[in-house]
Every structure is written in C-alpha cells, then in structure tokens.
C-alpha cells in the first residue's frame, strides 16, 4: 500500500497542455496531495476522535472522502473496487482514497473536452447534470472534509506536519 502513498508525496509537474481534463486532473492531484499529508501518521486511536456530538468522527470523515471520490469515479464510467468504508485501520482507508485520487487524476487527464462534455451525472433526485457539477459538488466537498480532517487532528492533539500546499511540496525535511 505504500506505493499509493508515494503518488502524492508532492504534486506532479503541471501538464503540458491546458484543457478541462488536465485542469480536473490537477484538481484530483491537489485532493490526493492534501489528503495524503492531512492523514499522514494517523493511528487507529485517532479515528475515534469527534470534536463534538453531531460532528463526524475522523473515521467518518475519511470514509466520506472515499465515498465522494468513489461516486465521481462511478459517474466517469470507472469501476472502482469495493472500498473498505468501515475499516478501523487508517492506512486501509487512506490507501484506498489515495489510489482512487490517482486513478481519477489519470482518467481526467486522458479525457478530451468533448469526452467530458458527454459525461452525464446522475443526481440523487434522478435528474441528469453536466460534468461541472462534479466540481462544485463532490470534488469541492472532499476539499472541505480534508480541511476538517486537519482541524480535527489539531483539536485531538495529533497534528500532521504541514505540507506546502501552494507549491505542492511535502513538509520540510521530507523527501519528495
């Protein structure tokens, strides 16, 4: 599983061309990178932390991010493997999410603008929406939850080392 984690030690060099697919792929890279460093060093004991009643626990947040990315993959016609949403092992949840973020990045980058334009998203209400709803919906939501993971970890007294998210580099002293 460590190989999946190495995928997001840093954000890869920018794509050579700019189009909707490469932009969405870069967004998936950013999600994978932020998630990797937000969850670095988590323990099984960390997963139980919940800052207040009514808030998701860290395990629930990790599972929810994995669910969001799985939903995106399914709507892109990918066949994501069954994910361990209820796992008590943070590395199992983490590995599945990082693998999925890498797969989404590759899928988006391989899609032309017309490929993306042809994607029809199934909403929970049964209507069909354009691919752009993936951006303001589950991809943006996953970034919100990654921020919550960071906040919850700080509140729990288990903060991860801060990565340079602007430049896409690992925390100081960590090799890219």
Image: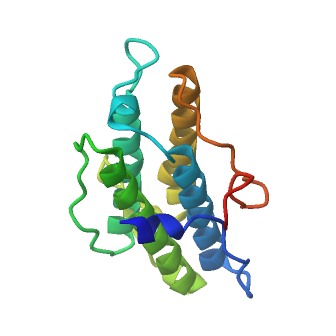
Q: Quadrant of residue 12?
A: bottom right
Closest to the observer: 144 or 50? Answer: 50
Please state if 173 lies on the left or on the right of 134 as rendered. Answer: right
- 96 lies above or below 42: below
Closest to the observer: 81 or 40? Answer: 40
Please state if 146 lies on the left or on the right of 4 as rendered. Answer: right
On the rendered image, what quadrant is the C terminus found in?
Answer: bottom right
Q: In the orientation shown, which residue stands out farthest toward the top?
A: 53
- 45 lies above or below 162: above
The percent position of residue 87, horizontal first and vertical second, equals 23, 44
The percent position of residue 173, horizontal first and vertical second, equals 72, 55
Residue 111 visible within the image = no
The percent position of residue 135, horizontal first and vertical second, equals 56, 57
Residue 129 visible within the image = yes
Please state if 156 lies on the left or on the right of 26 as rendered. Answer: left
Residue shown at 39%/38% (left/top)? 43
Q: In the orientation shown, which residue stands out farthest toward the right?
A: 167
């Amino acid at each position: 599983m460590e190989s999946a984690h190495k995928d997001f030690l840093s954000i890869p060099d920018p794509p050579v061309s700019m189009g909707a697919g490469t932009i969405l792929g870069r967004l998936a890279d950013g999600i994978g990178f932020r998630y990797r460093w937000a969850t670095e060093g988590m323990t099984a004991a960390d997963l139980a932390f919940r800052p207040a009643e009514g808030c998701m626990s860290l395990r629930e947040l990790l599972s929810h991010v994995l669910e969001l990315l799985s939903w995106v993959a399914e709507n892109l016609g990918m066949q994501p493997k069954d994910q361990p949403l209820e796992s008590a092992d943070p590395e199992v949840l983490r590995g599945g999410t990082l693998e999925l973020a890498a797969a989404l990045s590759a899928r988006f980058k391989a899609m032309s603008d017309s490929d993306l334009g042809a994607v029809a998203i199934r909403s929970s209400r049964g209507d069909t929406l354009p691919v752009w709803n993936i951006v303001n919906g589950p991809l943006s939501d996953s970034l919100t939850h990654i921020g919550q993971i960071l906040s919850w970890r700080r509140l729990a007294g288990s903060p991860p080392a801060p990565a340079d998210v602007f430049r896409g580099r690992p925390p100081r002293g960590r090799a890219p």
